[in-house]
Image (cartoon, grey):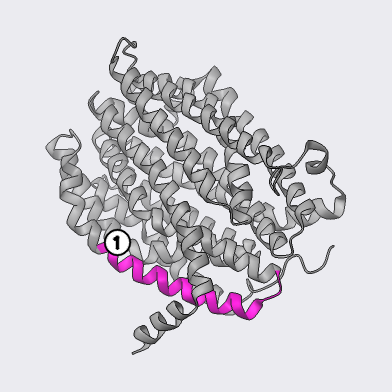
Amino acid sequence: MYITNRIKNIIKDKSFLSKTISIAIPIAFQGLLNTSLNFADILMIGKLGENAIAGVGLANKVFFVFTLLVFGIISGSGVLTAQYWGKREIINIRKVLGISLLLVLSASVFFVVPCILAPKFVMSIFTNSEETIRLGAIYLAVVVISYPFTAITNAYVSLLRGINQVKAPVVISSISILINLAFNYLLIYGKYGFPELGVAGSAIGTLIARIFECTVLLIYVYKDNGPAAGKIKQMLSLDMNFIQKYFTTVSPVIANEFMWGLGVTLYSLAYGRMGDTAVAAITITQTVEQIMQVVFMGLSNAAAVILGNEMGAGHLKDAEKHAKDLVFIQLTLTVFVGILCLFIRQPVIGLFEATAEVAGYVKLCFMVFILYLPFKMFNTINIVGILRSGGDTKACLFLDCTGVWFIGIPMAFIGGLVLHLPIYTVYAMVLIEEVYKFILGIKRYRKKKWLRNLVATEF
């Protein structure tokens, strides 16, 4: 009866449902395209052997840390953007964009320089396999050049989401992904007269696509002079009060994503020392899992925008009600996605040209993912969507970082390097952190400290 009444109430709230769908679906679709690209990359590179899969998979852990740092910046910025849009304060939205761009471009420099100058050293952090290091370094030295373009794109896409403009970035991203796939095919295998470059070809394809995506997005933003079309003078017209408000809200998010990302990268360090078979298995598993999770990332980003808009406009009761609705939607979707994962895991594994041992490990890793899915997906919408929407960013920092550093990392190293357990068992041990975050996260959500208007008054 409760479930039926809840569904009826959500359906009756047509404005909320329409806004949720209009924001969540394009974001989820964009995420699906990006993860599908990663999936296709692994399929293509898989034909080059397990060392190639492991090398590119570990090289992309550098990109993973970078994107999490960028995500921390733009996610924190998105909190203010959404609330300022609730008040329709375009000038302040452009100031948020200015600081965001300065930070993401500065962050990209710290990754680009070492990865170009010493790619083998960077790769040696993750694995001691010489062939994996060699192939990963070839890929990393080229693909890292795309990082600044990715940073700029993400900053503008975050702003567009905050003001409820999500369709154009999806279209641009879709075209970019097609370009990436085309050049990957041509350059990895040397088709139609193009040179056969292997893993370097995949990196060049990604670079071309990122440059295209960034360029076209900037043209779109500035041709109509919309809210995102901030001029340099407007974006950098900052005072200390505004800077203080920005960093008070955003700093915990940046620290959160970077420290969490660094911690998750240490998982890869442990996996990398369990052998190329373990690395290949976890790379395939997590690539497929990312596709399964896109709908939840779409919903979480929609939650951050919708709740942020409502709290910025002073509609706190609406925000509280809609947060409950979003959690219910998440739980319902978790059931469907879990069942889907169970049925498709074997056909998906069959797409990869992996050894029987790798395929067996992947199958068991999938079962681990399904078992932890309810905890993992609640944590996603609670931390990324609900708590952050009201600026409860210190609680998010505590939940994510203590989970990774006090539970996940010790479990990865004890299970993988001390007890020498198989990869699927180590993966299950690592994901205990999701149960920990689930328990504490529910308690924090119920305290309602996230339910506040951040832009009602100036500092």
Judge whether 153 appears above or below 329 on screen.
above
Report if residue 126 is visible in the image.
Answer: no
Q: Amino acid at mark 1?
A: Val
Magenta region's main secondary structure? helix
Q: Quadrant of residue 270?
A: top left
Q: Secondary structure at mark 1?
A: helix
Residue count near mark 1 (Cα–Cα under 10 Å), binned few <14, some 14–19, many ≥20 = some
Q: Quadrant of residue 113?
A: top right
Whether residue 322 is in magenta: the answer is yes
Residue 379, image x, y percentages? 46, 64
Q: Which residues are magenta?
A: 313-338
- Which residue sits at x=15%, y=41%? 350
The residue that disc 1 covers is 337
Residue 273, image x, y percentages? 33, 35
Q: Quadrant of the C terminus?
A: bottom right
Residue 109, image x, y percentages? 63, 29
- Which residue sits at x=62%, y=43%? 155
Whether residue 39 is in magenta: the answer is no
Judge whether 36 appears above or below 298 on screen.
above
- On screen, residue 197 versus residue 456, left or right, reads left
Which residue extends farthest bottom? 1
Report if residue 45 is visible in the image.
Answer: yes
- Which residue sits at x=42%, y=24%? 205
- Front one among 353 and 85: 85
Q: Quadrant of the N terminus?
A: bottom left
- Which residue sits at x=46%, y=57%? 298
- Front one among 374 and 21: 21
